[in-house]
Image (cartoon, helix red, strand yellow):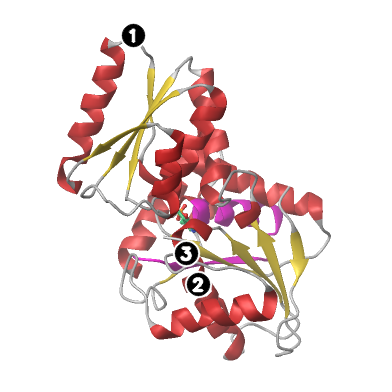
Amino acid sequence: MTPLYKLNYNNINNYNVFVKRDDLYPISGGGNKGRKLNYILTDCLEKGCNAVVTCGGIQSNHNRATAIRCRELGLECTIIIHSKPSKKFTGNLKILKLLGVRIVYCDLKNISSVMDEEMKKLRLNGFRPYYIWGGGHSNEGTLAYFNAVEELKNQTKINFSAIFVASGTGATQAGLHCGFKYYYPNAKVYGISVAREKEKGIKELKKTIQSFIKQKNLDNSYLKDISFDDRFNCGGYEKTNIEQLNIIKNVAQHFGIILDPTYTSKAWMGMNSFIQKRILPPNSNILFWHTGGLLNLMA
Ligand SMILES: *Cc1c(COP(=O)(O)O)cnc(C)c1O
């Protein structure tokens, strides 16, 4: 269970602002990818697989979490990185190197054929490989965040009404969206885009939720009230601006909470804008769901 506590936020509109510290999720470097991976690798083990193939960018938190869990569980691990090899071994890449998993570099456009090739190689070598989509995008990943809301429900009696979270592939948001609808029917999850534009983001979220509710036998009402806000993506994935860098500094100095430039500082910027503009009703219990990213800051 990750920590939850109230922040000493500016007293605007009598808001109460809380933080759920999934950046402290128990895996080195923390974050939402660790929570997703626990569900994904349970499925892997249940299917009797003993090797994993996955992919991501050079500073992918998902790659790092996958490699760490594979080492813990004694699974063979192949990580495909869709970029040029780097000589700068910082952040997540430093940890991948340290873990000594197999790393294959390729162009983004060849990613699926390279993944298939690596799956084939493992089979030829007598392994039973398990395929994980980039970012851990899967029903298991969504389920991890649906169940994370149950964890929250068991943790506190506070009735949250607005939840802010960084949204990339959307699996984390989709899980929280369904979980909050299930456990806190009056709450709304605000996904703050770290890259995608609104239209594409909503479309992908709907796909993810559709697939999840089908598997979990939930009705179509879970497809309603999806909020995906692209006003704080700072121009796209891994793009930053001055306002965002100031937020990272201010949040560290006021709260001792470390945000990162790729994901969580954008979510915080979104939440802060809602708070400053008094968009939510007075006395709202607002929750910032911290998804991690420490190693992105250290890259
Ligand atoms: C991957 C990631 C996200 C986005 O999660 P999705 O499920 O892909 O939307 C948010 N924050 C951090 C720190 C991440 O690593």
- Amino acid at pointer 2: Ser
Judged from the image, the secondary structure of the residue bearing numbered disc 3 is helix
Rate crowding at label 1 as few (under 14), some (14 to 19) or many (20 or more) other CA atoms within 10 Å: few
123 or 147: nearer the eye? 123
Mark 3 and ligand 1: say if the CB distance to the nearest ligand atom is below 8 Å: no
Note whether 294 is above or below 46 in the view shown. Answer: below
- Which mark is nearer the camera, 3 or 1? 3
Q: Is residue 27 magenta?
A: no
**Residues marked 2 and 1 touching at CB (< 8 Å):** no
Kindly tell me whether residue 214 is visible in this rendering. no
Residue type indicated by callout 3: Leu
**Residue at mark 2:** 265
x and y, in percent, of residue 252 in the image? 61, 75
Residue at image mark 3: 297
* The quarter of the displayed image where residue 14 is located: bottom right
Q: Are marks 3 and 1 in contact (CB under 8 Å)?
A: no
**Mark 3 or mark 1: whose residue is earlier in sequence:** 1
Residue under label 1, please give it: 126
As drawn, is 106 to the left or to the right of 247? left
